[in-house]
Image (cartoon, grey):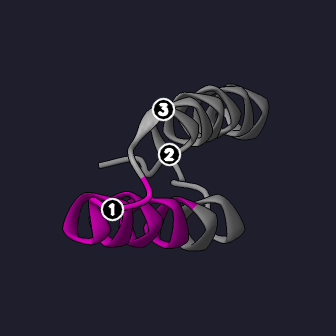
Amino acid sequence: MKSFHSRHVQALMRSLDSRIASTSRDDIATLNQLQSEKIALRKSHATPPTLTTA
């Protein structure tokens, strides 16, 4: 489960990096939003989900 989460987060990070690179430097609001998403992903990567049994 951890490696799947890690690969998923890395793919999302690459997508965000691409979107950041293609966003105009004048579009501060969009750049800030994308950076916030990237920070949230880094935090989620630090604490991967766990499976629990009911």
Residue 7: give its label: none
> Cα distance, mark 3 to mark 1?
12 Å
Foreground disc of the pair 3, 1: 1
Residue reaching furthest front? 26
Q: What residue does disc 3 label?
A: 22
Residue 26: give its label: 1
Q: What residue is shown at x 54% (from left), y 53% (from top)?
A: 50
SS majority, magenta: helix
- What span is colored magenta in the figure? 25-41
Number of residues whose C-alpha sits closer than 10 Å to that of mark 2, classed few (under 14), some (14–19) or many (20 or more): some
Q: What residue is shown at x 51% (from left), y 54% (from top)?
A: 49
Q: Which quadrant of the rendered structure holds the N terminus?
A: top right
Number of residues whose C-alpha sits closer than 10 Å to that of mark 3, classed few (under 14), some (14–19) or many (20 or more): few
Give residue 26's position: percent from left, percent from top: 33, 62
Number of residues whose C-alpha sits closer than 10 Å to that of mark 1, classed few (under 14), some (14–19) or many (20 or more): few
User: In terms of depth relative to the viewer, which is nearer, 16 or 5?
Assistant: 16
Q: What residue does disc 2 label?
A: 20
